[in-house]
Image: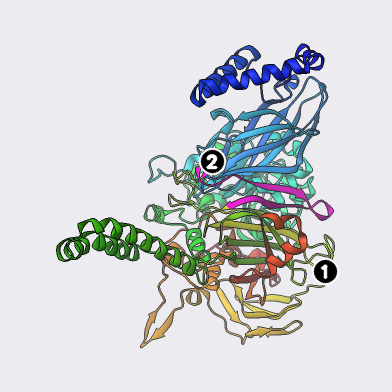
Amino acid sequence: MTASPSLLLASNICPKLMQAVGRSFAYFMESIGATASMLFLFGVSVSLSLFTGGNVSGADTDAGEVIQSIRSGLNGVWKVGYETVHRVELSSDRDLSVVLELDTVDGEGVGIRYRSADWKADLSAVQPITLSLYAKHGRAQRPIVVRVLDAQTGELIESRGLTDAERGVVLPAEQPWVVGIGTSGMKLDSAVLRSAKGILGDYTVTELDQAQWLPESGVAWDGVDLLVFSSSNRNLLDGIGESQASGVRDWVRGGGRCLLTLGANAEAWFLHPPLAQMVPGKLLEVTSQCNPGPLESYLNSEIPLQPFDSAILELNDAGLDLLGQKADRGRYPLLAKWAFGLGKVRLIATEIDSPSLLRWESQPAFIKWMLNDQWEGRGANAKSMVGAEDLSLQLGSTLDQFANLRMGNLTQMSVLLGLMLAVLGPIDFFLVAKRWKRPRWTWLTLIGTSVGCCLLLSVLQQRWKPSSPQLNAVELLDVDARTGVVMAKAYAHLYGGSRGVFSVEARANPKGLLHDPIRGGAAVPVSLVVDWMGQPGKSLGGFDSTVATDRILPSYEIVKRASVHGVVASSVQRLGLPEAGTKSLMASDEMPMPTDWQFGKLSSIPGAVDLLNGSIVNPLPCELRNGVLLYRGRFYSLPLRMRTGEGVSLSVSTIPKDFARRLQKRINVDGKDEGTPWDRNEIDDPKRLLEMLAFHRSAGGFGYTGMIHRYLSKLDLSELLRTERAILFAELPEPQVEWVPVRNSLQNDPNQAQGLGAELEGTRTAMIRIVIPVEQPSGSERNATSDDE
């Protein structure tokens, strides 16, 4: 609070008078006592707040309200546990440079503050500015606060909590989510089934009909299970910016699913280079009055469909489900599918919201066919999956098993309490009071027993709970040979040992596959994007948990910054861990593949499209261990150690084996086929767990594990095995991500930080999946095949 000019003048003229007044005030406070002093100061503060409007924080109030509006998610819808975009509109009646921060909670309910170097704006009275803030929220109903600070002084200008309208609709982490981009009447919810929970349907639909609602980064689509894109809204297509188009492309390439419906305005789609890259071919023409008969027959519909407009595409690398018929009886791809990066694209060569299809009474059946099997549990077995645990919980429990760390159980606690009660009860009574006739000694035995139990607990604490930090991590590296992109995901549990405050960073191993000479040399390690990791459910750390651990643990920060060549990276700062506490973290990154990585050439054999011909080569600077080559539900065994430059030839004489049998570890015993049941309670082999996370649906999904795989469903590439892609799946000899936790005062010393990361104990497991295109026999594009739905 600023003093008045008259008071300053008086203090300069009469310093002795001011000292006398101060001594008198101190004597007065001492005379009325501590309690009365507190009440007096409280009354003074209330009076000041009444006369000064309550503004005693030192904030710059001349700026007024800087935040004009906040829009969250995709048209007001977002998911817990996934990246969410918040569009904040800012304006000021004077020139002002501001920086924004966002306060929320993680999956454990601990407060977290997101800060980014990009969340800056120079405001003026000319035009409002909109900033996009990206953050993950761990609880649906906890407050979300946007803070505006002066970029020069760091003083708080405005702090605003999101209202219910600004927060929007929050979906559970396991809820399937379909987003339609086109007109406002796509009717994608016409196939919604009643939810067994009685609250939400078996999937949720959000429709976007304005280009301004599309996010500028692919991370904002992370919670979406299926993106349905229609070319019917020409104004929307014309208004899409390059960053918005790149965001859609990056999301699909990273493992998203897209249903692409192209009709009368298909040309506008190909005007955006990032969107055109998703189609393995080119647009030839757009024709009208196409024969609806093939589509009617495909759906077994007896209700007639009016002729429609279609985009005629020349597809070079796609599997066909159905050929359409033009007005001149020419044939063209009507229903097709292909892989793009780690994602899957399905094509319908007409717009799903065209007048012909909107008026068609069989459109709900068509929508149902489009959504069938797009996510695990869509269909008849959905009810049996209600209440099933997510596979990510098992990942968390596996990573939480640290060497030399023992957790006390209920039996041990019961034995300890029983001994204590025996000493304080029967032993005191029969031995001390009855036999020794010294009842007053029970006071000493009480003290001795309490001290002994405390000493025993202290010894157990030292023996069972190591004081040095440990870290367990698993990594999954994906290389797409067609798009030339390397994507890395790592999940870790940090054990802090003795309590303390940490900063955590994840860097690419300079000697590993993620070392990118474009983004950094050996002296500048590539930093990854680090964030907290949560899990669905009501258990501790779950998104549905009601435990408020923010009352116990301090808030921490996720600091996003521009790394080498402007690539975004982030780190965790001021992370408080209690004694023997752990924290779940994740790291991810994407970088270009080196041009000298050539994995050989594969083609399918004519007449046997599920068999491979050609060769596979390891061009990586490290060996591949225990590798298999997967294609259309089968696998070819590779050498136990495939060194750099070594290759394997495949021919018609090389017989593959069933991949599902391998995943389920099925063997034939006395003529009976027996498999190894999945243990839902404990999996101590990280490699086995990674194998299931990577190909859960190929193993039988819920029918085999008894668990759902939705929260981390983008890790599952089972659907890619139904396309013209082969996947080389193998172990890596060393981890590709270096986790660097720094405790307390070491955080300003990079040499100490590097040393702590290198000496960190724990288990590290790294697997790699290399997606390789398979050349199809000549003329196979005219043979429509099913999708094995």
Is 555 inside the magenta-drawn segment?
yes
* Amino acid at the residue labelled 1: Thr
Coloring basis for residues: rainbow
Residue drawn at x 52%, y 50% as measured from the top left: 371
Residue drawn at x 72%, y 41% as measured from the top left: 265
Residue drawn at x 44%, y 53% as measured from the top left: 379
**Left or right relative to 712: residue 411:** left
Viewer-proximal residue among 541 and 126: 541
| Residue 697 coordinates in the image, percent (x, y) | 50, 64
Is 758 drawn above or below residue 647 in the view shown? above
Is 604 inside the magenta-drawn segment?
no
Residue drawn at x 55%, y 35% as measured from the top left: 143
Q: Is residue 87 visible?
A: yes
The quadrant in which the N terminus is found is top right
Q: Callout 1: few (<14), some (14-19), or many (20+) C-alpha neighbours within 10 Å?
A: few
| Residue 99 coordinates in the image, percent (x, y) | 75, 35
| Residue 599 coordinates in the image, percent (x, y) | 74, 75
Indicate which label's residue lies in the foreground, 2 or 1. 1
Is 621 drawn above or below residue 475 in the view shown? below
Q: Which residue is mark 2?
A: 205
Q: Earlier in the sequence, mark 2 or mark 1?
A: 2
| Residue 605 coordinates in the image, percent (x, y) | 65, 78
Viewer-proximal residue among 212 and 624: 624
* Amino acid at the residue labelled 2: Val
Q: Which residue is mark 1?
A: 595
Viewer-proximal residue among 507 and 280: 507
Magenta stretch bounds: 550-576
Q: Is residue 737 visible?
A: no
